[in-house]
Amino acid sequence: MRLLAVIGALAIVVAIGAAVYFFGGFYSVAATEEIAPVAWVLTHVRQASVDRHAAEGPPMSLDDPALVRAGAHAFVTRSCMNCHGAPGVKWAKFTEGMQPYPPDLKDIVNASALSACPTRKSGRSSPS
């Protein structure tokens, strides 16, 4: 019984220490520093989610002109050009500090590589 009390007290001390560490601002959330265990967990959780939920192919034909117009409209209305640029539109100044840096979409053959984009969370393959 005494062993259980020691384990319980130790668990409470560890929980309080973790709370102080995270909520006290000692843990850096800056993307400029990569913390190996956190990066490993995030990468594996993302990949497991993609493997479980992603379909084998696109849900519709990407050759449909109406779909291309709808995609262009979504690109503009969601302000994607602020980070990724667009024909005749320069990238916004704040993107210089983003980590990872938002890619120029013209350079990406497979658009599913945009794993860091907050509006598109896939990441099945890497840019070529």
Image: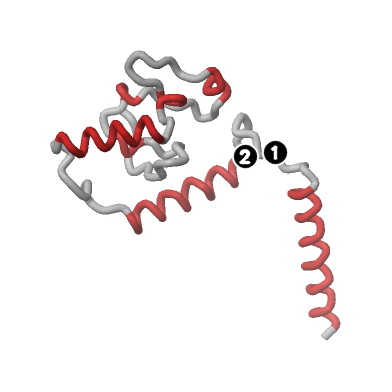
Check whether the beta carbons of the residues at disc 1 and disc 2 lie within 8 A of each other: yes
The C terminus, quarter of image: top left
Instruction: Point out the frontmost of discs 1 and 2.
Output: 1
- Measured from the top left, where is residue 58 in percent x and y? 22, 46
Q: Which residue is mark 1?
A: 28
Question: What amino acid is at disc 2?
Answer: Ile
Q: Secondary structure at mark 1?
A: loop
Q: Is residue 59 left or right of residue 33?
A: left
Q: Is residue 55 above or below residue 88?
A: below
Q: Counting other residues with Cα less than 10 Å from the Cα at mark 2, is it few (<14), some (14-19), or many (20 or more)?
A: few
Q: Secondary structure at mark 2?
A: loop
Q: Which residue is mark 2?
A: 35
Q: Residue at x 60, y 35 (%)?
A: 34
Give the colour scheme of this rendering. secondary structure
Q: Is residue 117 left or right of residue 110?
A: right
Q: Residue at x 80, y 46 (%)?
A: 24
All told, the count of numbered labels is 2
Nearer the observer, 75 or 108: 75
- Measured from the top left, where is residue 39 in percent x and y? 55, 43
- Measured from the top left, where is residue 86 in percent x and y? 35, 20
Q: Is residue 94 above or below residue 118?
A: above
Q: Residue at x 39, y 34 (%)?
A: 77
Q: Is residue 48 above or below residue 107?
A: below
- Measured from the top left, where is residue 38 in percent x and y? 59, 46
Question: What amino acid is at disc 1?
Answer: Ser
Gap between marks 1 and 2 measured at Cα = 9 Å
